[in-house]
Image (cartoon, rainbow, N blue to C red):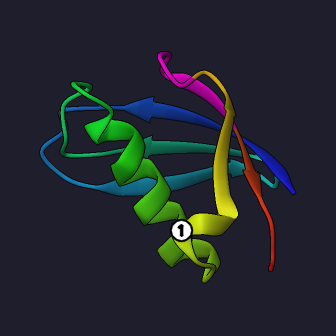
């Protein structure tokens, strides 16, 4: 499954908002330094979709706020 995620780093609260079935807005507490925000995105999505972190991969936008993420069920 592919989803689009707009990430807002350095937020006071961690919030995941579903825009439509394939688009999400995610606020994370971590700053976008040394991949910390990306790791927070993967961790939050793994909890939300109930999959292992290894099953979540950022396909496009690793250095951008707009990301395309692949989630596999294995």
Camera-side residue of 69 and 74: 74
Left or right of 57 on screen, residue 10:
left
Q: Residue at point 19% right, 41% down? A: 30
Magenta span includes 63: yes
Residue 48 appears at what percent x and percent y? 54, 74
Camera-side residue of 38 and 13: 38
Furthest residue to the right? 1
Quarter of the N terminus within the rendering = bottom right
Residue 60 appears at what percent x and percent y? 69, 25
Task: Indicate whether 50 appears above or below 34.
Answer: below
Task: Indicate whether 65 appears above or below 70.
Answer: above
Left or right of 7 on screen, residue 66:
right
Camera-side residue of 24 and 31: 31
Describe the element under mark 1 as helix, strand or loop: helix
Residue on which the image places disc 1: 53
Q: Residue at point 62% right, 29% down? A: 67
Furthest residue to the top? 64
Residue 34 appears at what percent x and percent y? 25, 27
Q: Range of the magenta residues? A: 62-68
Q: Residue at point 44% right, 49% down? A: 41
């Amino acid at each position: 499954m592919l989803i689009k995620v707009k990430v807002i780093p350095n937020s006071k609260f961690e919030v995941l908002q579903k825009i439509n079935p394939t688009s999400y807005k995610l606020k994370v507490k971590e700053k976008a330094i040394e991949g910390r925000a990306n790791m927070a995105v993967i961790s939050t999505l793994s909890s939300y979709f109930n999959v292992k972190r290894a099953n979540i991969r950022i396909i496009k936008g690793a250095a951008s706020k707009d990301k395309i993420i692949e989630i596999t069920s294995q």
